[in-house]
Image (tube, grey):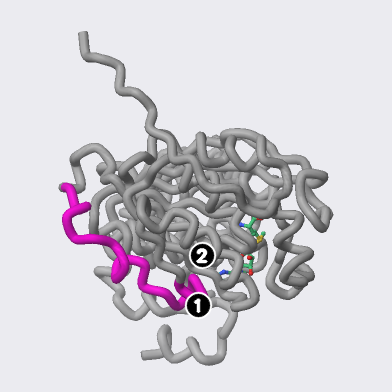
Amino acid sequence: MAAATKAVHIRLPPLPTIKDVIRLYKLRALKELSQNFLMEPRMIDKIVRAAGHIDNNVVCEVGPGPGGITRSIIRQAPRKVILIEKDPRFIPSLELIADACRDKVDVDIITGDILKTDIAHFVPKDVKVDWNDPPPALNLIGNLPFSVSTILMIRWLEKISKQEGPWAFGRTRMTLTFQKEVAERMAARILDKQRCRLSVMCQNWCSVKYKFDIPGSAFLPKPDVDVGVVTLTPLKQPIIRLPFKLVEKVVRHIFSMRQKYSIRGAQTLFPEEVRQEMADRMYKLAEIDPVTRPFQIVNTEFARLCEAYNEIIKEYPEFEHYDYRAPKANKELVEE
Ligand code: SAM
């Protein structure tokens, strides 16, 4: 039997509490940067625990703010911590933490926008493992700003699909917070009332686990909504093995009329004149009943629909760039 590995912990020297840090540095929360600080140490530790064993791992934290989660991460004895924070007002409080653990953990503090930062640049190369191996010793953790969380998730899924950025090192795991409703959508299975484009996309490239809720009252200031914590582990093989952009387009169109027969949304993938004929063909090729509603379609069926669409655009490449919201600009596609 394998010997149980003893958990390693780092004891930080006494630091001012997060509440004191906020008061000391006059860190008034800015609404425009979706700043809601997590004040309950038990909740903070629970998020970090949801990431699993991170000792000796490289951990990248998005939006550390005053550093509550950062402290909890460091106590788990990671090898290196990469902090990406857009608001420079937080840098002194993060430097305070970096100084307190200087001999034990390497901390990189980056002032920048997560949407424009190349995380991979800060990750030691030796972290890399093969895609089919268990996930690398690299973790992304963040109490994400609501204002960027969904955009960031979609961008990260595209990077996962291309095995780029933090996913050039293997199937890097993520432990992230979202507005509760968004978290529920990400994890929603078929027939669930929350099932939407985001559910299909997240579950196509990742194993998604809804871990637990955090009540709004755990934050300062209290947000209008509760928060959900989600872990995502990239799959070895996506269910729909086609380029991200194609999958995103087909799924978006099909969900554009959520309560209607799914073929209605699929029709909008094609110019008006051929819409019905092409959508019928797509559903026939995919062997999907056209009256199925979008939230009743499982990802393996979405795979068949995407493959059928791919077959059609191979035959009619002019439909690939058709945009039904700009019918005039697209008119020439069918007139050529
Ligand atoms: N991690 C802290 C906590 O849990 O108390 C703060 C969380 S607060 C919800 C979101 C943090 O993300 C803020 O510190 C905010 O300044 C930062 N932020 C907002 N937009 C960002 C962006 N585009 N890139 C990086 N950080 C961002």
The quadrant of the rendering that contains the N terminus is: top left
Residue 165 visible? The answer is yes
Q: Residue at x 66, y 35 (%)?
A: 42
Is 32 placed above or below 263 here? below
Q: How dense is the environment of label 2, judged by Cα within 10 Å: few (below 14), some, or many (20 and up)? A: some
State the image coordinates of residue 55 (x, y, percent, origin top left): 36, 39
Q: Quadrant of residue 321?
A: bottom left
For mark 2, give the secondary structure. Answer: helix
Which amino acid type is marked by label 1?
Gly
State the image coordinates of residue 161 (x, y, percent, origin top left): 31, 58
State the image coordinates of residue 288 (x, y, percent, origin top left): 44, 42
Q: Residue at x 68, y 37 (%)?
A: 213
156 and 203: which one is in front? 156
Q: Residue at x 19, y 42 (%)?
A: 132
The reply to whether the residue tagged 2 has its Cβ within 8 angstroms of ligand 1 is: yes
State the image coordinates of residue 57 (x, y, percent, origin top left): 32, 46
Q: Which residue is mark 2?
A: 152
Q: Nearer the viewer, mark 1 or mark 2?
A: 1
Q: Is residue 122 magenta?
A: yes
Please give the range of residues in magenta: 110-129
Q: Is residue 23 magenta?
A: no
Q: Is residue 36 left or right of residue 251?
A: right
* Real-space Cα separation, disc 1 to disc 2, in angstroms: 14 Å
The reply to whether the residue tagged 1 has its Cβ within 8 angstroms of ligand 1 is: yes
Label at residue 112: 1
Label at residue 286: none
Residue 150 visible? The answer is no
Which amino acid type is marked by label 2?
Leu
Is 253 placed above or below 45 here? below
Is 329 placed above or below 154 here? below
